Image (cartoon, rainbow, N blue to C red):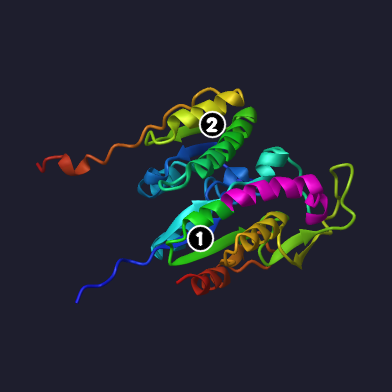
Amino acid sequence: MTGGPAPRRVAFVAHCLLNQNAKVEGGAKRPAMWEPVIELLRERGYTIRQMPCPELAFGGARRFWGVREQFDTPLYRRHCRRLAKLVAAVVEQEAAADDVVLIGVDSSPTMGIDFTPSAPRWAGEPNIGEDDSRLVRGDGIFVAELKAELAERGLPEPRSTGIRHWFPDYEPEEELERLRGLLR
Amino acid sequence: MSDLRSRRVAVVADSLLDPLLDELAARSFGVIQLPPAGLEPATVTAWLEQTAEHVAEFRRTGYEVVLVDDGCHTAELERLLADLGVPPLPQYAIQPPSTSRLTPET
């Protein structure tokens, strides 16, 4: 009795998880990539598909920190939708995959999966003083556009989670357990 | 707040990503992945357009960017980079395998 082919698993990951250079200045916790999630994906046999970084492309490498309210403009949403069309096309063309997951960044106004940063009064001079932003439940802007694009194409929404390495109460073991629970 | 980025970026052919990921991480290269085989041409172009835009921004702001190439998308990537005023990227030198095991025992 012969076994079938190995299941094909694909993980769509936020750009900065493979390239920390794309993070907003002050945000890179590692020189090159966020190894804990990359190593786990490789260990579990997931093919990695890196998504583009909407913020790097739109605001540049020298952009200021921002929260969801600042990014949520019609033009930025249009930009994110353009990138979401690319990612959705790749998802569609990976239709032979047995499992597809999405891994974002939960402190990002753009790539948040379960949480995104909010600060209703941030504006003007780039001097926020004491950081009064809060992490609130919700999608980042790109993630919202990606979900909408996938729905328009009749594609299922992948199981997903966000990396929380910038949460004040970040627990690496909790995150690894959450990632292990997401993967097959 | 300290920022640990290396300011070194490698644009990597998908066929070389898994074989070289450990080496690139050890040498502190963040990775931009090139399109995998099997995608429709329009999707490949859209992916390479994004790659070119990312590379142009990194080059504009003084990052080191190298190419780890298998030849599949070189011409189209170079054309897209040229459209953004970016010259062809230098090729990354893949590290040779260790020769320590070849040292004869004495």
Residue closest to the eye, B12 or B29: B12
The residue that disc 1 covers is A37
Residue closest to the eye, A77 or A126: A77
Q: Residue at x 76, y 59 (%)?
A: A117
Check disc 1: other Cα within 10 Å, few if <14, some if 14-19, many if 20+: some
Can you name the residue that lies furthest to the bottom here?
A1
Drawn side of residue B18 relative to residue B45, left or right: left
The residue that disc 2 covers is B64
Drawn side of residue A3 relative to residue A72, left or right: left
Q: x%, y% of residue B26?
A: 43, 45
Magenta stretch: give its range. A68-87
Drawn side of residue A106 relative to residue A173, left or right: right
Q: Is residue B94 above or below residue A147?
A: above
State the SS at label 2: strand
The quarter of the displayed image where residue A63 is located: top right
Residue B26 in view here: yes
Q: Is residue B94 above or below residue A172?
A: above
State the SS at label 1: helix
Q: Which mark is residue A71?
A: none
Judging from the image, mark 2 belongs to the subunit labelled: B
Residue closest to the eye, B45 or A169: B45
Q: Residue at x 59, y 46 (%)?
A: A52
Inspect the image, locate mark 2, and give the three-letter code of the amino acid beneath it.
Answer: Glu
Quadrant for the N terminus of chain A, please.
bottom left
Q: Is residue A100 above or below residue A63?
A: below
Chief secondary structure of the magenta portion: helix
- Indicate whether residue B14 is drawn in magenta: no
Inspect the image, locate mark 1, and give the three-letter code of the amino acid beneath it.
Answer: Val
Quadrant for the C terminus of chain A, please.
bottom left
